[in-house]
Image (tube, rainbow, N blue to C red):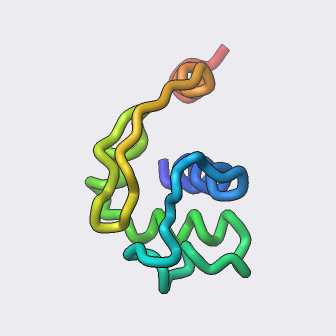
Amino acid sequence: MKLLAISTLAIVTSVGLAYSFPDCVDGPLKSTTVCDTSKDPATRARALIEMLTDEELIQNTDNGSDGVPRLGLPSYQWWSEALARLQVDMFFKS
C-alpha cells in the first residue's frame, strides 16, 4: 500500500496540482525534504509518506479524504476510472 501511495504522490509532485500543496513558503513542511526541490519527486513523496501515521495513510488512500491538517495536506474528493481498474487488478487475476 505504501508503494502505491508513494507512486501516486510522486506523479502528483512531478505534474503539480491546481492546489498550492505543499506550501513550501509558510506551511508546516517548508523545512523538510518534501519541499526540497533539489530532490527527485519519488524522494519527496517518500518523505511525505514517512511523515504520515498509519491511520492518516489509510484515511488518505481513498478517493476522498479530510486531508492531514498538521501537514498542510488539504481535503480532497477525486475519482478516476484508474482507481477502479487498480482495484480489479489487485484482487482478481484474469
Please tell me which residue lies in front, 36 or 62.
36
Q: Is residue 46 above or below residue 64?
A: below
Above or below: residue 53 compared with residue 86: below
Q: Residue furthest bottom?
A: 31
Dividing the picture into quarters, in which one does residue 65 lie? top left
Give the percent coordinates (x, y) of residue 63.
Answer: 43, 32
Q: Residue furthest top?
A: 94
Q: Is residue 33 left or right of residue 78?
A: right
Figure quadrant of residue 14: bottom right
Q: How many marks?
A: 0
Horizontal side of residue 41 vs 3, given as left or right: right
**What residue lies at 43% left-to-right and 77% top-to-bottom?**
26
Q: Nearer the viewer, residue 53 or 20?
A: 20
x then y, percent, for residue 7: 63, 51
Q: Residue at x 68, y 76 (%)?
A: 37
State left or right for residue 15 relative to residue 46.
Answer: right
x, y (%) of residue 39? 70, 77
User: Who is closer to the viewer here, 29 or 81?
Assistant: 29
The residue located at (41%, 33%) in the rendering is: 77
Task: Tell me the quarter of the image containing the C terminus.
Answer: top right
Percent position of residue 2, x then y: 49, 54
**What residue sits 32% from the left and 57% below the top?**
68
